[in-house]
């Protein structure tokens, strides 16, 4: 019974954690793409 009373907090914590990680990943990839656009094509070892 007690475990079910705390289930909302546990699920909410997981949602906040994974949501925060997803937002951070999206922001980091967006910054990386912007930075990659500034590198000349001949200096891009990943292409």
Image (spheres, rainbow, N blue to C red):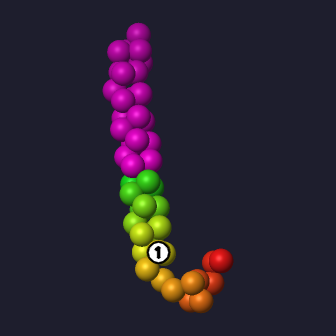
**Which is more toward the observer, 19 or 7?**
19
**Which is more toward the observer, 45 or 42?**
42
- Neighbor class of circle 1 (other Cα within 10 Å; few <14, some 14-19, many 20+) is few
Q: Position of residue 25 (x, y in %)?
A: 45, 55
The answer to whether residue 21 is visible is no
For the point 48% across and 75% down, the residue is: 36
Looking at the rendering, the stretch of residues picked out in magenta corresponds to: 1-23
User: Is 25 within the magenta?
Assistant: no
For the point 51% across and 86% down, the residue is: 40
User: Is 21 within the magenta?
Assistant: yes
- Residue most toward the bottom? 42
**Vertical position of residue 11 compared to residue 29: above or below:** above
Q: Quadrant of the N terminus?
A: top left
Magenta stretch prevailing secondary structure: helix
Q: Quadrant of the C terminus?
A: bottom right
For the point 56% across and 89% down, the residue is: 43
The answer to whether residue 27 is visible is yes
**Vertical position of residue 38 compared to residue 20: above or below:** below
- Residue most toward the top? 1
For residue 11, what is the image quadrant? top left
Q: Which residue is mark 1?
A: 37
- Residue most toward the right? 47
For residue 16, what is the image quadrant? top left
For the point 47% across and 75% down, the residue is: 37
């Amino acid at each position: 019974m007690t475990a079910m009373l705390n289930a909302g907090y546990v699920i909410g914590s997981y949602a906040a954690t994974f949501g925060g990680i997803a937002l951070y990943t999206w922001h980091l990839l967006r910054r990386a793409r912007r930075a990659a656009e500034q590198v000349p094509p001949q200096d891009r070892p990943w292409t």
